[in-house]
Amino acid sequence: MPNLALKKVPMPEQEPDVRNANFREVTLGYTEAMAIEEAKRCLNCRNKPCVGGCPVSVQIPEFIERVVAGDFADAYEIITSTNNLPAICGRVCPQESQCEKFCVRGIKGEPVAIGRLERFVADWAMANEPVSPTKADKKNRKVAVVGSGPAGLTCAGDLAKQGYDVTVFEAFHVPGGVLMYGIPEFRLPKAIVRQEIDALRGCGVDIKTNMVIGKILSLTDLMNEGFEAIFIGTGAGLPSFLKIPGENLNGVYSANEFLTRINLMKAYLFPNCDTPVRIGKRVAVVGGGNVAMDAARSAKRLGAEEVYIVYRRSEAEMPARLEEIHHAKQEGIIFRLLTNPIQIQGTESGWVRALECNEMELGEPDASGRRRPIAKPGSRFLLDVETVIIAIGNIPNPLLKNTTPGLETQKWGGIVVEAETMATSLEGVYAGGDAVTGAATVIQAMGAGRKAAQAIDDYLSGRRQDPENPACVVGSEIVEM
């Protein structure tokens, strides 16, 4: 019998007053019975509008149909035919603005919980089915992937499944990129990331850590070592700042540093770790995106009594996922909306004392389509805090640009690529993900990685040469302000 309920099967999760004091995963996942019941809400539409909303083209109705039948192993095979990281995507993808946005059930109720079902299937496979790597006939042709974030891992996995010898070069001491250093444990357990990466290793992907390409080796060095094509998926790891007085005070963090200390260096386990984070009792997080929510929720878990989200627009303009905003509010995060920082005040000893702000009102829309915030005259006030975390966006690190002659980039640092092939201005070199678009979503980076993998295969197989026309710009810098 189909499930005609207008609402999704609820997702079990920790109670807010319990979870805001620990770093365990907030959402607990569906049981088999819950997953089957939710899967029965799918109408199995003939034209599959949900698939068109998925950047990696997961065959959504097909895998959901197998969930209804209780054949979770087959559902996993269907998902992983196009998605190398399903347990991750099921947790962090903004399904509400992608696949679920186009679900027919969403017209008169809530869409099918596609993300929750994808997560269930992936978790079930990890717990019950040994992952059998896809082994392709070896082509004995080498491809280098720079960066092991979602774009790089996707590109590497797709190419390895086609028989290429793929080596991933990662600057950090562990692979995973933003999946490891940027997203907190309570949203994305690192054991899940490691399992997904191990599955790619099983497909033949070789991963070398502590390899800063542009310092240890150049792109030219890689070519000289026999790599016939290179994919750049280095992400956008250089934080943006407000450029206001006081940003050099002790107690001011970029969200990148703050979250890296917590996620990658396990600061939340202090004193049983080497990297503590001092936060004090009152914390202000400046920004309105997912990174800001992650930082604020992490600060609360580290023991801060009051944590503020300081955002210069209204909630309607916030780029964060609705789920993240909802969870933050449940956990006691205080939202100071229509508030713009203008100065960070310090103590005589050089520590943060307060955040000086203006109250704002919304004017006409700017280039992003959001209404431009305008300061109210005479509205200055002080927010007493001991820590300020800046979470207004990131841009690509300029290292590769500065060490690679001929690599064309935009003024703000994004690599210029040809739209259809992800080819850069250098022959045999491709790029995708945040290194091209600026900070975006995990699944968008994965979609770029898939597209580049296909283009690299075409290039090395002689089916398509790099375009003669100059590379064109794809995307633009995305700054969460």
Image (cartoon, rainbow, N blue to C red):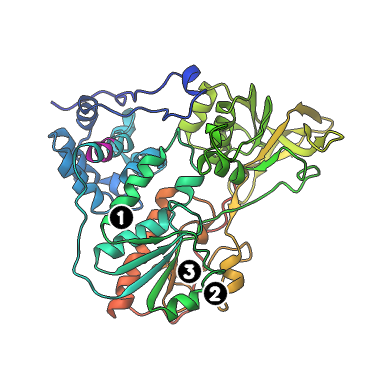
Q: Nearer the viewer, mark 3 or mark 1?
A: 1
Tell me the kind of residue under disc 2. Leu
Q: Which residue is mark 2?
A: 407
Labels 2 and 3 touching (C-beta < 8 A): no
**Separation of marks 2 and 3 at Cα, in angstroms:** 10 Å
Question: In percent of the image, x 84 and y 36: which residue is there?
Answer: 349
Q: Is residue 45 magenta?
A: no
Q: In what element is the residue under mark 1?
A: helix
Q: In what element is the residue under mark 2?
A: loop
**Is 72 located above or below residue 85 in the figure?**
above
Q: In this figure, what is the number of numbered marks? A: 3
**Of residues 139 and 354, the one drawn nearer to the viewer in this rendering:** 139
Place of residue 469 in the rendered image (x, y in percent of width and height, measured from the top left): 46, 80
Q: Is residue 454 visible?
A: yes
Q: Is residue 425 visible?
A: no
Tell me the kind of residue under disc 1. Leu
Question: In percent of the image, x 26 and y 75: which residue is there?
Answer: 140
